[in-house]
Amino acid sequence: FVILTTRRSASVLEIREAAVAFGVTASLAWELFEYATFLTRSTEWTSAYSDTVGDLVLGWVGSVVAALLIAHWWRDRRRTRV
């Protein structure tokens, strides 16, 4: 998503920021949906909070790793075009 929506002249820092922002936002939206589902439709509601918090941390870490990979790819792509 980040690669498709970012302008070609964007800096590596802008790419990292966009990747983390998108990843954390998507993770948060999914976890809020999952948490609401646990509370209303599951017998696992007693562990829903700790599961959601753990998943949010993993979502953030995944977003940072993805941002670093995308920024590396972006930097290499810009070097080959110059």
Image (cartoon, grey):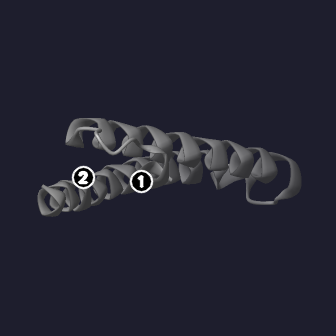
Left-right relation of 2 to 35: left
Left-right relation of 28 to 62: right
Q: Which residue is mark 1?
A: 3
Which percent across, then down, holds residue 26? 57, 46
Which percent across, then down, holds residue 33? 73, 47
Q: Residue at x 51, y 45 (%)?
A: 53
Which percent across, then down, holds residue 56? 49, 47
Residue at disc 1, secondary structure: helix
58 w.r.t. 28: above or below = below
43 w.r.t. 63: above or below = below
Residue 41, numbered circle: none
Residue 71, numbered circle: 2
Q: Residue at x 33, y 36 (%)?
A: 17
Q: Residue at x 40, y 47 (%)?
A: 60
Q: Nearer the viewer, residue 11 or 9?
A: 9
Q: Residue at x 30, y 36 (%)?
A: 14
Tell me which amino acid carries mark 2: Ala
